[in-house]
Image (spheres, coloured by chain):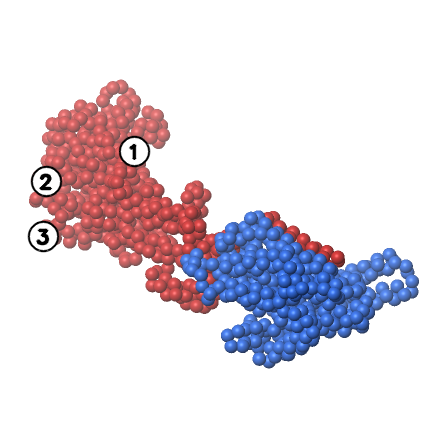
């Protein structure tokens, strides 16, 4: 009897214990999941990026991340593992400790972005490292080291990004800049999950419940960009050793053909394991290569601003296409040239006193006897018209971090000088594109585009289509008309033609024999050093295919270097090559530098 | 009357049924452990294939026992015992070492484990000795003499060393109790176990203080005669000395045994080392939940997370795949087996058969107690098979022999 009771008592105790283990305590179920079930994240390939001619700008390269589940790592030969990974044994142990401190059950990255070669060796020994497994990832690669500022780069998500978007998990990659950032959602695709079972030796034992919980990774969509890789490459080559920016646009579509901010860098530098080191290096570079001048640098436009001034003057009927003004150098400094007899002449020779007069007529129209009030009324009208050129406006290009520039308006001067404390005499330097105006190089190219289109622009953009079905990614392709009538453009365009092709023109170095180029030089005074040089233009004159702005910091007169740089690019784009007869010019342009570039 | 037909008519059907259920369930369990979704063809080379052959032979063995004259077992009990002792001695010399213990004798393709058959032989010899008319188990002298029968093989098995198998022989103490030994011995054993655990967990001075208070309380509850006071002092001295002795002995143990005990007592949580088996075992059983993952669906047990899966830790598979429900059914079935044997033992007309029956029940109980206790983390890791469930021919045949000799005895219960 007592013996039966002993039997029953023991059985009862065990029964209760089993109840506790199997039903009350959830810990063991979780442990079991982490033991034998592994959620393998399937990382999709990021979308490729093509140029306008189908050339690949960005592709993916397979690398491997070595993952660890610290709770399963047992009897690890750290020396062997360290040797395989080419790290130190202490380093390996340190990483294990760190991962273990983070979580014993969740996976952590043990070694990032292992190359194919190292992976090949590691794979043979992986069975000796229980708790370790390999996850394949992809890195961005750039066949040509160009367009870094446009393409942007990809990096690991920050904690802030994880917090703001539940899609991202520790260790995911995200576009940090440029198109990679702007089109992140299209490029990234969708992560998938493969639930697999593994045995104690870390060998996969097939899919869990026949893949019932698996989701396939969906690859990112391709981007068909508007860039012309050859033009971009050539532009970057010409800009080597210079500071500034080149933006080329197809006027009829607003498609950006090239967008250069110099100095630039090889985008392959900001990939994978070397990214953070190189990023710090670039950040510390005194030439500020990470700064995208094309979209973020404010420059006074200089004489290229005479184009909208002339247009506004005619639109407001304060001058006619045939108005002439003598070159009175006591009003504002100028170079020696015959008096301009019409608008086209003024533009061609870039006569400062001419545009002083034009601007004065725009601002002071005698609508109020008080010259302060009169100037204010004039400037308000001027400001409205000026903004229709896309100035002081954030152009909706498909990149983040675009500045809007500055066109000073009445309120601006009121704030600065006080209401009715300023008049034309205070602000006359605006007439020749100096003073408080700030344009970004993209807006200068857009101005060239407006001139080419004779009156409108299409918002510059970098992507034409997305994905296999080539959908428009939401690009605004509407024509944005300026407030200027079509007919007033012809005399100004004639002036631009003259500047390049006629005697006395300021942009003669932009002349190409086979192509009719229209252009305007500018010299932008710079309180910090040598003048900046600028040139905008388009070609051919009729049915233009390319509009361009070249801005060179501290490079003097716009006709000297900016104009020939633009002409080389125009020729290259329109004819596919630079003719032999202009090689000397190309060499000259390449030789001109404002700093000595070093190889990173 | 034909003896054969008599035998089969008198077979205890419930016990036979329970036996068959356990063996068949055991086979399905082993099948699940070895089951490979990618390779479902049947093969005798696999463990479930071999186990099927073992079971087949076990059934033949059982049938053979039933048609054999009972005297073959009873008369030659001492001879078998002698052979078992010789084998146990031999295994120490010629045995092949498997995982640190010399437990197996290899005879060509056959490996046998003498300790398994020693259980049967000891049970038979012990019963024969105890059932002598001159024996009175109330007498200490007789108790000691009877104990020697199981202490000898136990000692030899300890030398292999195979703590699990040795421990099984302790179960004969319960039989002695049934035959008249004082319950105080069991109580003392229980106290010894409690003090053993306490000695390792509690500071020695605190523990001795507690023992002092307990003895004092005991004294206060009884008459304070001179004799009782002397007894109390002796009890106190004995308990204190015992705990200090345990502590001393523990420090003399090999480090891996120390760690095993520490892990069990919760003093050591190194789940990578000594605690690995138990932790994985608990994970497997715990993950079964209420109704289990379903047959062949276990992930922990199938992918070798639990070591010794098909032998000592076979219970994990059951726990993982059938959950608490399955474990309950298993425990119920096992308790049914034990209680049925006890009930049958009590109806025997001969002391020999009764003692033997109790021996069988207690041996099965000990296996269940130690094996399941180990897998659910209540007892230290001691390698011992779970009867009818663990993979292996030797143990299955030994248990079958043990049980069927008793069934045979039971068929003769009406005989004069």
- Of all chains, the one bearing label 2 is A
- Residue name at image x 42 percent, y 47 percent: A212
Number of numbered discs on residues: 3
The residue lying at 27 percent from left, 30 percent from top is A387
Name which residue lies at 57% across and 54% down. Answer: B319
Residue A496 occupies quadrant: top left
Residue identifier under label 1? A393
Percent of width and height locating residue B69:
65, 70
Give SS at disc 1.
loop
Q: CA distance from mark 1 to mark 2?
A: 31 Å
* Comes first in the chain, label 3 or label 1: 1
Q: Quick check: B293 left or right of A476?
A: right
- The residue under label 2 is A516
Q: CA distance from mark 3 to mark 1?
A: 41 Å
Q: Which residue is mark 3?
A: A580
Q: Specify few, some or many for label 3: CA neighbours under 10 Å numbering under 14, 14-19, or 20 or more.
A: few
Label 2 CA crowd tier, 10 Å (few <14, some 14–19, many 20+): some
Marked residue nearer the N-terminal end (1 or 2): 1
Give the position of the C terminus of chain B as an image quadrant: bottom right
Q: What color does chain B have in the rendering?
A: blue
Label 3, label 2: how far apart the Cα atoms are? 18 Å
Vertical placement of residue B323 versus B7, above or below: above
Sequence-wise first label, 3 or 2: 2
Left or right placement of residue A60 versus residue B380 in this view: left
Q: Nearer the viewer, residue A391 or B128?
A: B128
Q: Chain of mark 3?
A: A
């Amino acid at each position: 009897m007592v013996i039966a009771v002993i039997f029953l008592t023991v059985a009862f105790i065990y029964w209760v214990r089993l109840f506790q283990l199997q039903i009350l305590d959830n810990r063991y179920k979780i442990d079991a999941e982490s033991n034998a079930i592994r959620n393998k994240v399937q990382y999709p390939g990021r979308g490729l990026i093509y140029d306008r001619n189908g050339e690949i700008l960005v592709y993916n390269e397979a690398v491997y991340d070595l993952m660890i589940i610290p709770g399963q790592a047992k009897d690890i030969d750290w020396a062997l593992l360290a040797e395989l990974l080419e790290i130190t044994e202490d380093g390996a142990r340190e990483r294990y400790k760190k991962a273990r401190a983070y979580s014993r059950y969740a996976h952590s990255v043990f070694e990032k972005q292992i190359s194919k070669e190292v992976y090949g060796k590691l794979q043979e020994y992986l069975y000796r490292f229980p708790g370790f497994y390999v996850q394949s990832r992809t890195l961005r690669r750039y066949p040509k080291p160009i367009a870094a500022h446009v393409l942007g780069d990809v990096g690991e998500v920050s904690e802030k990004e994880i917090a703001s978007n539940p899609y991202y998990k520790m260790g995911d990659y995200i576009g940090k800049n440029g198109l990679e950032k702007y089109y992140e959602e299209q490029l990234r695709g969708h992560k998938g999950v493969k639930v697999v079972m593994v045995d104690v030796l870390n060998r996969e034992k097939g899919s869990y419940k026949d893949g019932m919980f698996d989701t396939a990774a969906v690859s990112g969509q391709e981007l068909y960009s508007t860039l012309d890789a050859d033009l971009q490459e050539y532009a970057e080559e010409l800009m080597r050793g210079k500071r500034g920016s080149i933006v080329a646009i197809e006027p009829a579509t607003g498609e950006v053909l090239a967008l250069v901010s110099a100095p630039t860098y090889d985008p392959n530098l900001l990939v994978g394991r070397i990214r953070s080191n190189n990023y710090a290096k670039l950040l510390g570079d005194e030439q500020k290569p990470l700064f995208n001048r094309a979209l973020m640098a404010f420059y006074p436009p200089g004489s290229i601003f005479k184009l909208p001034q002339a247009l506004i003057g005619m639109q407001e009927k304060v001058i006619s296409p045939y108005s002439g003004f003598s070159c009175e150098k006591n009003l504002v400094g100028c170079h020696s040239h015959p008096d301009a007899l019409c608008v086209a002449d003024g533009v061609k020779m870039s006569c400062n006193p001419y545009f002083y007069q034009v601007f004065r007529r725009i601002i002071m129209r005698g609508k109020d006897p008080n010259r302060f009030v009169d100037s204010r009324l004039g400037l308000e009208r001027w400001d409205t018209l000026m903004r229709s050129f896309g100035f002081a406006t954030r152009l909706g290009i498909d990149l983040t971090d675009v500045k809007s520039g500055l066109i000073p308006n009445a309120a601006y001067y009121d704030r600065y000088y006080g209401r009715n404390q300023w008049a034309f005499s205070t602000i006359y330097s605006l007439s020749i594109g100096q003073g408080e105006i700030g344009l970004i190089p993209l807006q200068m190219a857009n101005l060239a585009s407006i001139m080419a289109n004779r009156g409108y622009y299409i918002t510059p953009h970098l992507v034409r289509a997305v994905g296999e079905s080539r959908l428009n990614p939401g690009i605004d392709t509407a024509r944005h008309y300026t407030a200027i009538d079509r007919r007033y453009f012809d005399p100004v365009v004639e002036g631009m033609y003259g500047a390049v092709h006629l005697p006395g023109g300021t942009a003669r170095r932009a002349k190409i024999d086979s192509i009719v180029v229209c252009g305007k030089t500018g010299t932008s005074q710079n309180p910090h050093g040598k003048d900046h040089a600028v040139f905008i233009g388009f070609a051919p004159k009729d049915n233009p295919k390319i509009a361009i702005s070249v801005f060179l910091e501290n490079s003097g007169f716009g006709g000297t270097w900016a104009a020939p740089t633009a002409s080389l690019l125009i020729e290259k784009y329109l004819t596919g090559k630079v003719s032999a007869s202009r090689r000397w010019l190309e060499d000259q342009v390449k030789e001109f530098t404002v700093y000595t570039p070093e190889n990173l | 009357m034909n003896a054969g037909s008599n035998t089969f008519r008198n077979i205890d059907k419930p016990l036979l049924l329970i036996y068959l259920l356990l063996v068949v369930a055991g086979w399905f369990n082993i099948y699940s452990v070895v089951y490979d979704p990618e390779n479902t063809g049947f093969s005798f080379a696999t463990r479930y294939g071999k186990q099927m052959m073992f079971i087949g032979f076990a059934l033949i063995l059982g049938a053979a026992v039933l048609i054999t004259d009972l005297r073959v077992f009873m008369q030659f009990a001492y001879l078998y015992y002698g052979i078992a002792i010789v084998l146990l001695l031999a295994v120490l010399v010629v045995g092949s070492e498997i995982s640190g213990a010399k437990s197996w004798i290899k005879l060509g393709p056959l490996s046998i484990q003498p300790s398994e058959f020693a259980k049967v032989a000891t049970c038979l010899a012990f019963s024969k000795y105890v059932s002598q008319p001159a024996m009175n188990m109330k007498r200490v002298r007789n108790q000691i003499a009877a104990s020697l029968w199981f202490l000898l093989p136990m000692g030899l098995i300890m030398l292999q060393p195979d703590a699990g198998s040795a421990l099984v022989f302790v179960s004969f103490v319960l039989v002695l109790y049934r035959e008249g030994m004082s319950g105080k011995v069991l109580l003392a054993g229980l106290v010894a176990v409690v003090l053993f655990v306490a000695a390792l967990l509690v500071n020695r001075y605190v523990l001795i203080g507690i023992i002092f208070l307990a003895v004092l309380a005991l004294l206060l509850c009884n008459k304070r005669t001179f004799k009782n006071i002397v007894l109390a002092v002796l009890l106190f001295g004995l308990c204190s000395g015992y705990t200090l002795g345990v502590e001393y002995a523990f420090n003399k143990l090999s480090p891996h045994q120390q760690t095993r005990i520490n892990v069990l007592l919760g003093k050591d949580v190194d789940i990578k080392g000594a605690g690995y088996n138990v932790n994985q075992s608990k994970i497997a059983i715990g993950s079964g939940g209420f109704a289990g993952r379903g047959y062949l669906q276990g992930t922990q047990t199938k992918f070798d997370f639990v070591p010794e899966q098909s032998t000592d830790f076979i219970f994990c598979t059951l726990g993982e795949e059938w959950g608490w429900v399955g474990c309950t059914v298993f425990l119920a079935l096992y308790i049914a087996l034990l209680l049925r044997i006890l009930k049958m033992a009590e109806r025997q007309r001969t002391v020999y058969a009764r003692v033997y029956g109790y021996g069988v029940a207690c041996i099965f109980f000990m296996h269940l107690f130690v094996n399941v206790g180990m897998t659910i983390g209540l007892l230290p890791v001691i390698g011992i098979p779970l009867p009818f469930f663990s993979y292996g021919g030797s143990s299955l045949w030994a248990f079958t022999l043990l049980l069927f000799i008793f069934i045979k005895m039971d068929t003769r219960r009406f005989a004069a």
